[in-house]
Amino acid sequence: MRAVEFIAKKRDGGEHTEEELRDFIGKVTEGSLPDYQVSAWLMAVFLRGMTMQETCALTRAMRDSGERIDLSDLPNGPTLDKHSTGGVGDKTSLVVAPLLAAAGIPILKMSGRGLGFSGGTIDKLEAIPGLRTALGREEAKQQVRSIGLAILSQSSQLAPADGKLYALRDVTATVESIPLIASSIMSKKLAGGAERILLDVKVGSGSFMRELEQARALASTLVTIGVQEGVPTQAVLTDMEEPLGWTVGNALEVEEAIRVLQNADAAEPRFLALCLGLVEHGLLACERAKNPQEAQNIAEQLLRSGTGAAKLEAMIRAQGGPKALEAVLTALPRAPITYGVEAPEDGFIAAIDARVVGLLAVALGAGRSTKEDRIDPAVGIVLHKKRGAWVHAGEPLATLHLQDTQESQRDHFKTMLLSAYRFAAEPVVLPPSPLLEVLSSV
């Protein structure tokens, strides 16, 4: 089938066969299709959707577009891969993966770059001078064997078709499509070879799934793909109505993750609760705890003991970064200008629109507007107050980290940030936990 016919079939609501999808993905991988045709098909899928059968077939085609890693011979299994659907300030993997590895669970995590207003784990890690994320299959596997943890980027060897589609989705307004999100995530997870998969599906203004029903549909799709491919998969729906933690921006988020692992008492409470909750689910999925209470106790012990920090330090060192976490903190790039934003009125912070904050981070240079854009690892936003807090007029709300060239735009950036806030005269009641629901194939 010619590319034009393939695009037209989906445009008109047709259903692709597995053979057609494999042929198309093969051409995407080899680079024989121009971006405009691939983008046209992405938009057709965005508008018309895909059946579950199509989505599973697309996932398999993308998984098989490159090599696959076999982790079945690693000791101390089952191996686990944790993934988030993406959110604003989402540095969760930098805390959760080291803690799970510290529990003795082998973790090989293949991560992506930022999509739109959502930051990517690989962009954050590459803010660390010298750190490599482009690990080969055997190199990554050997690193997991030796220290228990590796976080690597996609490559021309592992799920390369997804890497190409991922970059185009980011700049063609086709990110928020359940079949495209699900096939992207699960093709990487399945190519990575993990024997258990833990998924953090974000819900709210700072995610691609703004409504709970949308998130449930995505989570169900992800779990179904895992079931069909024989990999026990769990999806946890989590709150993404405000930015996660105190920081948004790559180097700033790396620093925050390190600080959390070094001193849990300094962590933003809801971010810490999310991290610990995901660790608990990972422990149960890999049978390292008999029940939720035991999993909670182990997670708390791992965090307080400092073993998670030691595991992250070992991973950074193994992948070419500084040898110690304190050296990482010293080496992280810093923006030359900081600009404070104060509260315009008295009141309780009723809401912080995570999407607006994410778009501001992109405007600062912490994200991409086109696939050719370079990330500035130093810029970003530090929040000083979160939902539920009382503030007085003139009290610091946030600090913007800017480059010299952006100083003339700081008033515009301030206005943009303040538009994310809503204040109320009465106290705000927050959900008791950022973990909302769990869907599991087990």
Image (spheres, grey):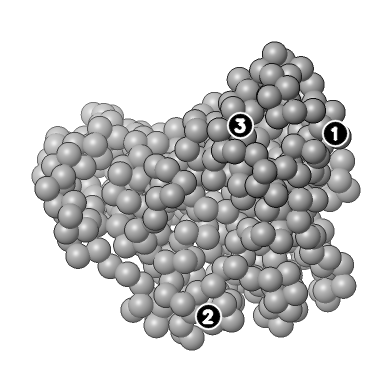
Density class for disc 3 (Cα within 10 Å; few <14, some 14-19, many ≥20) is some
Q: Earlier in the sequence, mark 1 or mark 2?
A: 1
Name the residue: 87% across, 72% down: 73
**Local secondary structure at mark 3:** helix
**Foreground tag (2 vs 3):** 3
Q: Residue 168 falls in which quadrant of the image? A: top right
Q: Nearer the viewer, residue 318 or 6?
A: 6
Q: Report helix, strand or loop for mark 2.
A: loop
Return the x and y of residue 163 as percentages of the image width and height.
62, 50
Closer to the chain start, of discs 2 and 3, is 3
Give how far across and how far down residue 433 sits, in percent: 53, 43
- State the image coordinates of residue 232 (x, y, percent, origin top left): 82, 49
**How far is the residue under mark 3 from the one under mark 1?**
19 Å
The residue that disc 2 covers is 320
Q: Nearer the viewer, residue 342 or 289?
A: 342
Q: Secondary structure at mark 1?
A: helix
Judge the density around disc 1: few (<14), some (14-19), many (≥20) Cα neighbours within 10 Å.
Answer: some
Residue 207 numbered tag:
none
Q: Residue at x 40, y 36 (%)?
A: 355
From mark 1 to mark 2, how far is it between C-alphas? 41 Å
Say above or below: 212 vs 329.
above
Residue 34, image x, y percentages: 59, 38
Q: Residue at x 25, y 63 (%)?
A: 335
Q: Amino acid at mark 3?
A: Gln
What residue sits right under mark 1 in the picture?
Answer: 18
Left or right: residue 39 versus residue 431 is right
Disc 3 to disc 1: CB gap under 8 Å: no
Q: Amino acid at mark 2?
A: Gly
Residue at the (39%, 42%) spot, across then down: 369
Q: Which mark is residue 37?
A: 3
